[in-house]
Amino acid sequence: MVRHAETEWSESGRHTGRTDIPLLPGARRVAADLGECLRRVVPDPVLVLTSPLSRAAETCALAGYEARAEACHDLEEWDYGDYEGLTTDEIRAERPGWTLWADGVPHGETAADVGRRADRVVDKARAAGGDVLLFSHGHLLRVLAARWVGLPPIGGRLLGLRAGAVSALGWERETPVVLRWDVLVEGQPGR
């Protein structure tokens, strides 16, 4: 699983759901470097899925998987409704103590809504019969990982995920597990 590289809004902490924000110029190099790393670890994925939002789709393309990628609307980021484009501090100025996981967003998706989308992606990945690459967004991937290991959608609150990070889900015998989490490519900011 790959979280898209940095955008202006992810850098500033703005909730970026359905607003189609482009990658920052330096993030394009990070995305290309991710491709080199991914090809060493997953040389021949049987399925490549990407959110259709440009920041994820461009990360996928720059990593070298555009020709094989299928757009998957279930991989779109959480719909933040009225909180789209706001930072947590701005939201808390009106709603002290607010958290996305516990309080949700007015006119947007609930954790359960995002969990249902994540479940469909998990089902598709498990049915693929081999390695799968996903290019998506921070909160969606956190929920997806929680659902992979059998936690409720709000279990994603326990899994921080930086822009441009790679994570791996898999199996320990018959048990779904998180194999690697929030790994950055060497030389990437935040490393």
Image: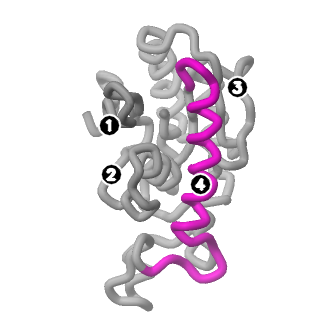
Mark 3 neighbour density, 10 Å: few (under 14) some (14–19) many (20 or more) = some
Q: Is residue 25 magenta?
A: no
Q: Determine whether the residue tagged by mark 2 lies in a helix, strand or loop.
A: loop
Q: Amino acid at mark 3?
A: Ala
Residue 69 disc label: 3
Is the residue 149 above or below the residue 177 in the image?
Answer: below
Question: Where, by quadrant of the figure, is residue 52 drawn?
Answer: top right
Name the residue beneath numbered marker 1: 181
Q: Amino acid at mark 4?
A: Glu
Mark 2: which amino acid?
Leu
* Residue at the (54%, 29%) spot, across then down: 28
Q: Which residues are magenta?
A: 103-132
Q: Position of residue 173 (x, y in %)?
A: 34, 25
Residue where numbered disc 2 is placed: 159
Compare residues 95 and 142 and report the one nearer the observer: 142
Cα distance, mark 1 to mark 2? Answer: 8 Å
